[in-house]
Amino acid sequence: GIGRGMVEIPTDFLKIRRQVQQDLSSRIKLDVIRKSILDGSLVTMSRNTVLFTSFMVYIDLSKQACAKGLVPSFLRTEDSRGLTPFAKGAICANMAWMSCWPMDVLKTQRQSGNFDAKMGTLELLKENMKQGKLFRGLVPGLVRSTLSNGTSMVVYEAVHSYLSNMLGVTRKDML
């Protein structure tokens, strides 16, 4: 989560600033970038840590639920020991995103520059709670997550199987 944050903070800052910029013909000024590039960095690091930790926890919980027969058969692998690759990527990632979505909203608001930089994160959280904005954008975010993470897990599993067969290695820790 932290490694991803180191890459994500400056690139998301530039993306978000460009998305909310009023005058699209002008460029973002270098002094604004220099002063504001780390806006939202603590929230981003926290969000990523929760996101990736919870993703792994949900994968483990999904294995347990499959083993107990609590998951519909069409979502399970042939041996019923885990979710199919698409279901694992989509469901576990979506649950992870729901676990940290309010932090993502705060991160985006911080990086947008549309909020008082002097307002603390806790104050911003309280303000969003009062206004009912903590889960704003969740549905489009989950649609994107379903498609991207489900597809990514299918590709990952296919490459993993291919390389395992090619090298004669079997990995049993992930289904």
Image (tube, rainbow, N blue to C red):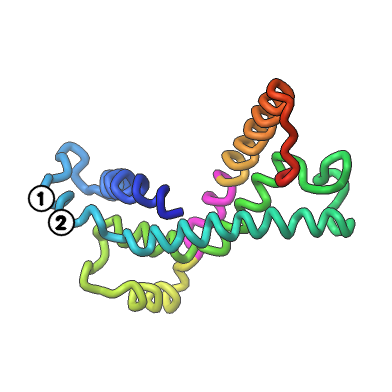
**Three-letter amino acid code at the position of disc 2:** Lys
Whether residue 171 is situated above or below residue 165 in the rendered picture: below
Q: Position of residue 118 (x, y in %)?
A: 21, 72
- At numbered mark 2, what does the secondary structure look like: helix, strand or loop? helix
Kindly identify the residue that appears in the image at 42 percent across and 48 percent down.
Answer: 4
Q: Residues within 10 Å of mark 2 (few under 14, many from 20)?
A: few
Q: How many marks?
A: 2
**Residue that carries the numbered disc 1 in the rendered image:** 31
Q: Where is residue 95 in the image (x, y as percent from the top left)?
A: 63, 58
Q: Residues within 10 Å of mark 1 (few under 14, many from 20)?
A: few
Q: Which of 22 and 1 is in front in this view?
A: 1
**Residue that carries the numbered disc 2 in the rendered image:** 35
Q: Are marks 1 and 2 in contact (CB under 8 Å)?
A: yes
Whether residue 21 is situated above or below residue 85 in the rendered picture: below
Kindly identify the residue that appears in the image at 74 percent across and 34 percent down.
Answer: 170
In-image side of 128 versus 66 (left or right): left
Farthest residue, direction left:
31
Predominant SS along the magenta part: helix
Q: Position of residue 174 (x, y in %)?
A: 71, 45
Q: Distance between the residues labelled 1 and 2?
A: 6 Å
Query: Which portion, as a residue range, is magenta?
Result: 135-144
Kindly identify the residue that appears in the image at 26 percent across and 65 percent down.
Answer: 115
Farthest residue, direction top:
166
Q: Quadrant of residue 171?
A: top right
- At numbered mark 1, what does the secondary structure look like: helix, strand or loop? helix
In-image side of 85 versus 66 (left or right): left
Q: Nearer the viewer, residue 10 or 101?
A: 10
Q: Position of residue 149 (x, y in %)?
A: 60, 42
In-image side of 153 versus 43 (left or right): right
Label at residue 16: none
**Three-letter amino acid code at the position of disc 1:** Asp
